[in-house]
Image (tube, rainbow, N blue to C red):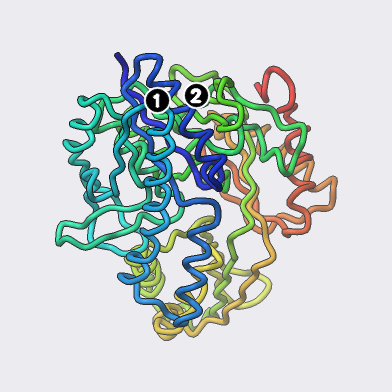
Amino acid sequence: MARLVQKFGGTSVADVQRIRKAAEIAVAAAAEGHEVTTVVSAMGHTTDHLISLAEQVTADPNPRELDMLLMTGEQQSIALMTMAIQSLGVPARSFTGPQAGIITEHRHGYASIKEVRAHPVEASLKRGEIAVVAGFQGLSDNNEFTTLGRGGSDTTAVALASALEAERCDIYTDVNGVYTADPRLLSEARKLAAISYEEMLELAAGGAQVMNARSVELAMDTQVPVRVRSTFEPHDDGTLITNFMSAPNYTICGIACDMSHASLILTSPVIEASRASLEGVSGLFTRLKELRIQTDMVMLLAREDEPSQELAFTVERRALPRVQAIIQALDSELGHPKLSIDTDIARISVVGRGLTARPVVVADIFEVLFNASISVQMVATGDIKVSALVPAKHARDAVKLIHNRFDLSGANCGS
C-alpha cells in the first residue's frame, strides 16, 4: 500500500463545487488502496483579500499579526475539504500546519521549514483516515505561528511527502502539467511528459508559475518524485518531475517569462568609485541577503565612453522600497551613485542542458531577438539557463520567437 501526498492549489478549491471535485480525487486514490494526505491552499483569492483587509486597517501591517490573519484562509479550506471527503463516506481529519508538525524558523511572512514532526498525520493514516493538512503555515521553535510565503503550500506538500516517505507528491492545479512555455502566452506550447528537478527549478525561478521554486529545490534535495496534474483532468498523468538521469535529455526544455522584476543601475563617477572599496557593494548584497531579497543578473561595468562605473542588477518589484532604502543608507560606501530604475521589463529564461557547451544556443537567441528589433538590456548565462532582459512590451513576441526557433512545439522539444 503506497502513500501519496496530494496538494490542491487555490484555483482547485476556489468554491464548494471545486472542493467536492478535489475530495473525489482524494477518495478515488484512497479507494485504490493508497494512504492519502492532502494539502490545501486557501480558497481562490482569499489570501489576496485578507492582505487587502489588513492594508485597509494599516499601511504597514505587523508581520506577526498578518501571519495570524493569513492562516485563517487555509483553515477554512481544510475544514470544508474534510467535510466534503466525509460526505463521500470516507473518514478524514483536518490539521493546521502546526498540528501536522510543520516546524519552521522564526520568521514571519517567508519562513523556511526546518523539520516535519508528522506523528499526528501518521496516526491519522493508520486509522484509515485521509489526512487534510493546511499548506502555507507552520509553527516556530518559540511557539509562534508563521507562514511560508507565496507558493508555500507546494513546499508543505513536498516536506510532508518526504517525512511520510510517500511514493509521490501530486501537485493539482489548473493546468495539466509543465509546458514548454506558458500556454496562456503561447497556445502552441507543448506539455512535457517529464522534466528533471534541476530544469524545473530553473523554470520556476525564471517565472514559471506551475510550482514554487523552494518546493522544487526541496523535492530535489529529498528525491521526492513530483507529478504536476490538473484537478479538472484527473486522469491525465501530467508531468513527472524527477532526477536528472530519469528525465528526457532535452537541449531546450522550456522558456519562462517573468514580468515581476525591476532593474536597477547604480552609476558612480570613477573618482568616487576609486575611493570606495568593494566594501560598499559587499555591504549592499549582504544586507539584501539578510532580508532575503533575491537578486539576479548582476553586472559590474566600467564605462569607457564616460568616466563612470555601473552596478546593475534585478530584484522583484515589490522589494523596491526596501532596496532603495538600503542604497540610500549605503550612499557614501557606494560612491554616491545615481540610481536608475526600470520596472517596464521582462526576463525571458531559456532552460535546457549543457548550454555553456552549446554556444550556438545563445547565438540563436540573440539572432532571433536582433532580427525582430527586440533590444536586450542584460544577459545572464549558465549551464542550465540563459536569461535575457527585454522591454515588457516585447515579452510575448520574444517567447514566441525563441520557442519557434528551437521548435519546442515539435516532438523533439528542442533536442
Q: Residue furthest right?
A: 372
**Left or right: residue 40 compared with residue 14:** left
Q: Quadrant of the N terminus?
A: top left
Q: Tell me whether circle 2 and circle 1 mark residues in contact (CB < 8 Å).
A: yes
The image quarter containing residue 297 is: bottom right
Q: Residue at x 73, y 43 (%)?
A: 399
Report if residue 247 is visible in the image: yes
Can you give x and y, in whole percent of width and height, for residue 320 in the image? 52, 72
At label 2, the amino acid type is: Leu
Assess disc 2: are there few (<14), some (14-19) or many (≥20) residues with their C-alpha within 10 Å of its C-alpha.
many
Q: Up-down: is 394 above or below 317?
A: above
Can you give x and y, in whole percent of width and height, for residue 327 in the image? 45, 78
The image quarter containing residue 175 is: top right
The image quarter containing residue 230 is: top right
- Please name the residue that numbered disc 2 is placed on: 240
- The CA distance from mark 2 to mark 1 is 7 Å
**Left or right: residue 167 compared with residue 411:** left
Local SS, label 1: loop
Residue closer to the observer: 369 or 403: 403
Q: Residue at x 34, y 64 (%)?
A: 67
Report if residue 313 is visible in the image: no
Assess disc 1: are there few (<14), some (14-19) or many (≥20) residues with their C-alpha within 10 Å of its C-alpha.
many
Q: How many marks?
A: 2
Which of the two labelled residues, at mark 2 and mark 1, occupies the earlier sequence position? 1
Q: Up-down: is 411 above or below 222?
A: above
Can you give x and y, in whole percent of width and height, for residue 255 in the image? 64, 39
Q: Quadrant of the C terminus?
A: top right
- Please name the residue that numbered disc 1 is placed on: 225
- Tag of residue 93: none
Can you give x and y, in whole percent of width and height, for residue 330 in the image? 40, 81
Q: Residue at x 67, y 56 (%)?
A: 346
At label 1, the amino acid type is: Pro
